[in-house]
């Protein structure tokens, strides 16, 4: 009895240590599992940042483009310069769905050149690499004439590939365009895509998109100044991918650029407030305008106000 009382606390200590070890093992195992899922188990939704850049020709950051890949089917949002080669790089990294010939569906936020300069590449290169289906593109008014002009500009190339003896299919260079309006713009067995208007300076039509997949809800801001529609469409979504500029970098800009950027884009301070209200599971910074600020400083500016999980996206990141 006396021995038992003396041993009691020791047993309790041993039990607590065992419980801690077991808890650690369990947490490590579940951590590994979620990592595997985000790296792309069958049936998973992958978010692949193909390009996180801006009009600045940063060699580390390709033109803006995001791929939502569901059951190995890719859905692109925007096609900035470099889009096809970044998809090939992601494929090489193990994202099977981003084989170049699979690139056949795209959604366009707005027609700024940094988001669309990869369009001829997206129309023509996957065709040369054996895409048979026409490219299907959903975008604002103006996407149709842009498409027609590009096809006309490349008519000599298309003619020689069709009729000059090159083994080529007769369909993969074609493009089917759809002018979109706010609301659900696309639905199949993998995704429902909803478009919503955002404030992007003088653009009459600039969209954000909400993707609902079997496992996740993902909201992409597109380019915008603070827009209540982003908050309304996220409301606790799994992932919010939002454009941003550094507040401290902004303060170093000339007054005429400050006037422009404050109408067209969102500061770290403004985004922190937006995210606090939108409550995403994960906030990914995208289309970052640093203006000499470091990535750490950019994140620090957000975290001063926002307490949720936030990362600064880089090209070829997979979430
Ligand atoms: Zn842009
Ligand atoms: Zn823009």
Image (cartoon, helix red, strand yellow):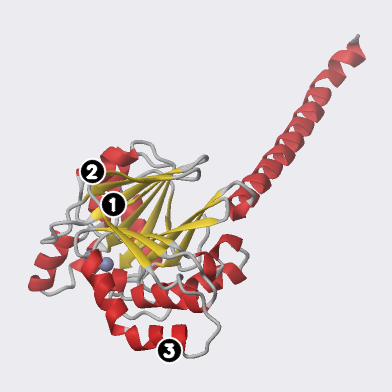
Q: Nearer the viewer, residue 13 or 189?
A: 189
In this view, the residue in front, 228 or 27, is 228
Q: Residue at x 50, y 43 (%)?
A: 189
Residue closest to the eye, 36 or 147? 147
Above or below, 175 relative to 153: above
Q: Which mark is residue 229?
A: 2
Between label 3 and label 1, give the one nearer the viewer: 3
Query: Disc 3 beta carbon < 8 A from ligand 1?
Result: no
Question: Which residue matches tag 3?
Answer: 160
Crowd band around label 2 with a 10 angstrom C-alpha radius: few (<14), some (14–19), many (20+): some
**Residue 66, position as x, y percentages in the image:** 42, 61
SS under mark 1: strand
Q: Which residue is mark 1?
A: 208
Closer to the chain start, of discs 3 and 2, is 3
Whole-angstrom CA distance, mark 3 to mark 2, is: 46 Å
Secondary structure of the residue carrying tag 2 is helix
**Closer mark to the observer between disc 3 and disc 2:** 3
Name the image quarter holding the N terminus: top right
* In this rendering, position of residue 17 left or right of residue 214: right
Mark 1 burial class by Cα count in 10 Å: few <14, some 14-19, many 20+: many
Q: Quadrant of ligand 1?
A: bottom left
Q: Position of residue 252 (x, y in %)?
A: 18, 72
Q: Residue at 13% x, 72% y: name it.
A: 257
Q: What distance separates the C-alpha of mark 1 from that of mark 2?
A: 8 Å
Q: Residue furthest top?
A: 1
């Amino acid at each position: 009895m006396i021995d038992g009382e003396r041993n009691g606390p020791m047993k309790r200590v041993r039990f607590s240590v065992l419980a801690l070890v077991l808890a650690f093992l369990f947490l490590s195992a579940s951590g590994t599992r979620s990592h595997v899922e985000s790296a792309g188990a069958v049936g998973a939704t992958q978010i692949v940042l193909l390009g996180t850049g801006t009009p600045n020709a940063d060699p580390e950051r390709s033109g803006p483009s995001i791929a939502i890949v569901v059951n190995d089917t890719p859905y692109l949002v925007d096609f900035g310069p470099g889009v096809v080669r970044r998809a090939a790089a992601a494929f090489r990294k193990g994202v099977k769905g981003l084989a170049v010939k699979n690139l056949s569906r795209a959604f366009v936020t707005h027609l700024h050149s940094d988001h669309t300069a990869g369009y001829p590449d997206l129309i023509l290169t996957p065709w040369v690499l054996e895409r048979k289906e026409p490219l299907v593109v959903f975008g604002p008014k103006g996407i149709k004439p842009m498409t027609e002009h590009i096809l006309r500009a490349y008519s000599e190339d298309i003619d020689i590939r069709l009729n000059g003896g090159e083994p080529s299919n007769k369909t993969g260079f074609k493009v089917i365009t759809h002018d979109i309006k706010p609301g659900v713009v696309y639905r199949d067995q993998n995704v429902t895509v909803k478009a919503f208007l955002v404030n992007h300076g003088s653009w009459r039509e600039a969209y954000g998109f909400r993707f609902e997949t079997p496992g996740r809800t993902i909201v992409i801001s597109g380019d915008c100044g603070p827009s209540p529609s982003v908050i309304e469409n996220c409301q606790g979504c799994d992932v919010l991918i939002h454009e941003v500029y550094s507040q401290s970098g902004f303060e170093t800009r000339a007054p005429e650029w400050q006037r422009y950027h404050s109408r067209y884009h969102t500061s770290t301070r403004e985004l922190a407030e937006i995210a606090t209200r939108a409550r995403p599971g994960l906030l990914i910074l995208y289309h970052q305008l640093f203006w000499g600020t470091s990535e750490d400083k950019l994140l620090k500016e957000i975290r001063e106000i926002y307490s949720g999980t936030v990362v600064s996206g880089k090209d070829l990141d997979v979430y």
